[in-house]
Image (cartoon, grey):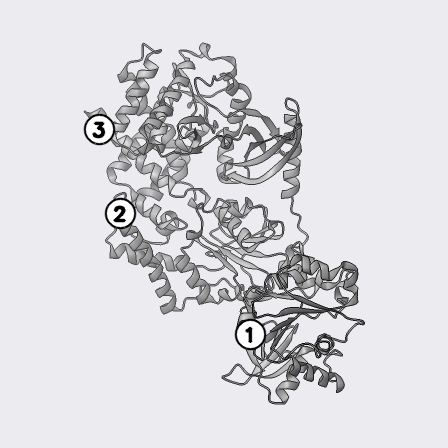
Amino acid sequence: MIVLIPLGGTGERFKNKGINVPKSLIRVDNKPIIFHLIDNLHIHNNIEYVYIPYNKEYVEYDFENMIHKQYPFIQFKFLQLSENTRGAADTIRIALDNLKKDTIDCPILCVDSDNFYTTDIIKLWKGENKLFAFNDKLDVPRYSYITTIEGTTLVDNIIEKTKISDSACCGAYGFSSWKQLLQYANYIIEHNIMQKNEYYTSTIIQSMINDNININCEVIQNKHYYSLGTPEQIEEYEHPFLFDLDGTLVNTDHIYTSVWKHIFNKYDFAFDINAHFFNNFIKGKNDGLFLQYLFPNIDKMLIDEISILKDNLFIEYLKNNKARILLPGVCDFFEKNKNKKMGIVTSCNNKSAEYILENTGMNEYISILIAAGDCIKHKPDPEPYLNAISTLGLNPNKTIIFEDSYSGYTSALNADVYKIIIIQNEESCIDIQNANEYKISDYTDFNINQINGLSNTKEQGNLSICEKIKTKLINTLPILDVVYNDIQLKTGYICDIQSYKVTFNDNSTENVVLKINNCNNNLSKTAEKMNLYNNEINFYTNISHHIDNNILHIPKSYGTINIDKERNGIILENLLKHEGEFNIDLNNNIPTLLEVVSHVANLHKKYYFKSKGDVPLNMLNVNTMEQVLFFKELLKERYPTFIQKNKILLKENEIDILNHYFEKYDENSKQTSTYPLSFCHGDMKTANIFYKQSKIPYFLDWQYIQLNKGVSDICFLLVESVKFDKIKVDLVLKYYYCIVNNNIKDYTYDEFMNDFKVCLGVFPLIVCVWFNSEDSDKLIDNVFPIKFMKNMLEYMKWASSDEKN
């Protein structure tokens, strides 16, 4: 078998655009067009050689050596054409005429050089008389088109650039005999049978059909065929699309609401599933996580059983109801953009997502599906989109992502892509409405060219930040260069953490991290009102370097930079240079839990103030809880919404407990702000700790620093990071008390325990109300609010029962 790639043309359409490189050598995605073809051809052992007759203009590019060097394990045969040919059929004729003397007859596959295929067309060809086609529903004829004898794959008509059907040829034509092909190539040229003033391969095929030679058609899916034959097609191809699924391409919320209602009825779960419940407690959440927090004692086998049932019911509903779930215009939009690589990145389970693609016909266009089971981290982390970009080999600087949710938008934003297009609807959250991106309501009449020319400033922004970091560090360090690492260490709505590589004058390197405050979303605006960003800058600028490592380990700070009028960044050492890990589960690691408590207790002992006069100058601007007026405002404003939203999850006595703490907030806040006080971290939890060598804690995220009762840090650590267990709680509290009591002699255990119980109704209550009244789509872990609330209530119940006893 022979593969023939004719390069007889001069690429006039490109020359008219000022591109004078031979067409097959034009670079697309950093490699010549012809490399795209050969890379995807799957050359089999039964292919004797690849035969390339080429126009003489390729000579100055050392074409033959270029091909041999790129593909040393493929056998090639070349023919330099002495003059321009009059079409592909003429090039084929000249090339085959040069084979007559030394080549026995065998099958030949003629492949246009400006197409490529992501399916194995050589395997599909099988050495037969066969052409390859795809489904082209567009009105403008860009290809040759065929019809087949009804009920068969036999071609009965083929014509160039005239739409006689939707079956378009995709530039690959197989023949069982190269000698027969040569015979018919000679025939059409001798008889001057042309179409559009050119000798086409399609004309050869029609002549063979006219002589009753059978030519079969093999249809391949759109997602397996790409054409790079014109400047416009290259522009299309070079800007691939990635889509979210639900809310972006389809709307299935009503189906899932019905499915979960069926499941909850089947298992006698005591909840009424409606749209409100689905949107607040199910939508966008992992099956296992939300079931565990609704039903703490549910076992894994039942979770797996329910998850499988959910997928099966969803698919059954689609089958039986023939539900129309595609957003308007999706099919036409895909068809118009089928020359692009397209992928779907979704939080759906794989089985349901795959069925949706098959059921809607989107599978014809979608090259990759990244679903829930394909990622470790999920949206809003960028990992799902980065996986798709890596797997498809896309250039992120030219990739366009379509999203509808804020978590998905944040994931896309941190994947550093060319453009993000938002699908906005009546349920879009305020942050989606305010996002500075191109927005559409659906795909009807949407032309992607409408967004061309919009600037992409991400790369320029990174370069600017590098310069600012270098300017800051060069004051104290011998810096040669700073470059962006393209590693997103952490993504959040309140802040992002990015990695940069610093090169010193001796060419040694070190990674640093830049912690950047976010802006223009509701969570970041709330953080601004809480003064979180200024708190942390104040800590690393004025306080951290005074805290001895013997007391508490803190990442080294190299200073702060101003990024723009709304954002600042803190330059910190990258703790990942040490062996260790973040966020150890303290429930099953009591020694590490006590090590954390010990360090925190030492901080509180060292910075213990009997009165305001004892507070050092660098801590005088650190607030007490009572001084943060926004905490009280937030609680007052959101508490009714919090109760209304979550009352379906709460028992009557739990609502009573919450109401009790809410009513006593002012009193409790005042008590936790009355001296003696200690300097406190404020947001003490295992997620804010790096464990060097998995045991030595380094404390991060000093955004909530406050003057408070020292035990407030222990209170929040327990509620956030340790599932309530009376024995563990007693152990931690008594261990902490014993350490601080060595220095603080006039602090009785009863006073200490009273402070602990009061602290439960201050910052933990604020966090609980805050996050349980947010749109779950805006949260990195959208099950966290329920988990936190349930655990906090266990501590509050214990504290209440202890008071009664």
> Which of the 4 quarters of the picture holds residue 228?
bottom right
N-terminal label among 3 and 2: 2
Residue shown at 64% from the left, 59% from the top: 72
Q: Is residue 737 above or below residue 207?
A: above
The span from disc 2 to disc 1 (Cα, nearest Å) is: 52 Å
The x, y position of residue 748, in whole percent, is 28, 14
Is there CB contact under 8 Å for labels 2 and 1?
Answer: no
- Residue 99: image location, x then y, percent: 70, 76
Q: Secondary structure at mark 3?
A: helix
- Per the image, label 1 sits on a secondary structure element best described as helix
Pair 3/2: label in front? 2
Q: Which mark is residue 315?
A: none
Q: Can the viewer see residue 486 in this picture? A: yes
Q: Which callout, 2 or 1, points to the residue nearer the camera? A: 1
Residue matched to label 2: 299
Query: What amino acid type is highlighted by mark number 3?
Result: Ser
Specify the amino acid type for callout 1: Trp
The outermost residue toward the right is 83
Whole-percent x, y for residue 236 in the image: 64, 60
Under circle 2, the secondary element is loop
Q: Indicate the quadrant where residue 186 lies.
A: bottom right
Residue under pointer 1:
125
Quadrant of res 679: top left
In this view, which residue lies farthest toward the front? 102
Q: CA distance from mark 3 to mark 2?
A: 29 Å
Residue wearing tag 3:
801
